[in-house]
Amino acid sequence: MKIIHISDIHLTVPGEPMGGLNPHARFAAALDHVALHHADAARVIITGDLAHWGESAAYQALSDALALRALPVRLLIGNHDDRATFLRVFPDHPVDAQGYVNHAETVNGTRLVYLDTVGTRTHAGNFGPDRLSWLESELTAHSRLRLFMHHNPMTLGLPAEDRIALIPEHRPAFHALLKRYADRIEHLHFGHVHAPISGQFHGIPFNSVPSTGNQSLPDLQETVWLKGAPMAPAYHVILVQSGQTTIHQIPFAWDGPVAKSGTGWEDWAKPSAAE
């Protein structure tokens, strides 16, 4: 199974820049690249910060962009999103019994679980008891799960970024749930940090994905400011097969030269002066 992971597209009212970039052009380029090279993907999962200011026009632009391409897209929301506005533009989007944008589906024998970690007037993640019960029902009912969310549920050694991870009040219960069902969770995927970070948490491998907009510059000493730059964007291709997960980072915006070399020994051997 192939899954495309895109995150932090930060769409604006069309015509308005975001961080000096055109987020619509970058997102369109990502979708076009996926459609051209990965039309066989089972899912294209966009893990939040769909809009930068949570505006209706931005969500409508997202809807229009998706309508132009026949891709099996699944949407999550992030801290820059407005849940109510998102659901007005996407009225048929699934929600849980509490109205959160939590939903799940089984694809090729794997349970894909999409989490709503958005709080009220905060950039930090929230996932309290009312949402934990829904997640636990998924974890108890299925044996092969892959979790997708916007916020990182654990700290990452980035002091400024860790201030807007899942809030400390919600971490113990969320972490305990992950630990209890670690043998059922194949992988944890998230966005939010605008950078490729990987590791393992309670035995569960995790990965974050770069943004299609500005990228973050990881600073392991900075305690206040998030640092970013208009560096090249990327998305991830996740390959799942026979108990193995392989993740490729795709620099979809690169339009420069590409060198080709073979895999034979002679292709890498330095010519001698006598030749």
Image (spheres, grey):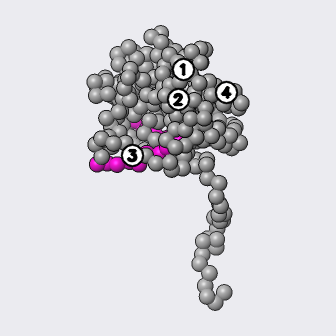
Q: Earlier in the sequence, mark 4 or mark 2?
A: 2
**Local crowd at mark 1 within 10 Å, few (<14), some, or many (≥20)?**
many
Q: Earlier in the sequence, mark 1 or mark 2?
A: 2
- Hey, which residue is sitting farthest top in the picture? 97
Amino acid at dot 4: Asp
The crowd level at tag 4 (other Cα within 10 Å; few <14, some 14-19, many 20+) is few
By secondary structure, the bulk of the magenta-drawn segment is best described as: loop
Residue at (59, 18) in percent of width and height = 89
Q: Position of residue 95 (x, y in %)?
A: 52, 15
The kind of secondary structure element at disc 4 is: helix
Q: Residue at x 38, y 40 (%)?
A: 200
Residue 176 visible somewhere in the drawing: no
Q: CA distance from mark 1 to mark 4?
A: 14 Å
- The stretch of residues the image draws in magenta is 204-221
Q: Choose between 256 and 248: the one closer to the eye.
A: 256
To which residue does mark 2 refer? 51
- Residue under label 3: 227
> How far apart in space, not on screen, are marks 1 and 2 (Cα)?
9 Å
Q: Which mark is residue 86?
A: 1
Q: Circle 3: is it few (<14), some (14-19), or many (20+) Cα within 10 Å?
A: some
Q: Amino acid at mark 3?
A: Lys
Decide which of 81, 35 is in the foreground and name it. Answer: 81
> Does 218 appear in magenta?
yes
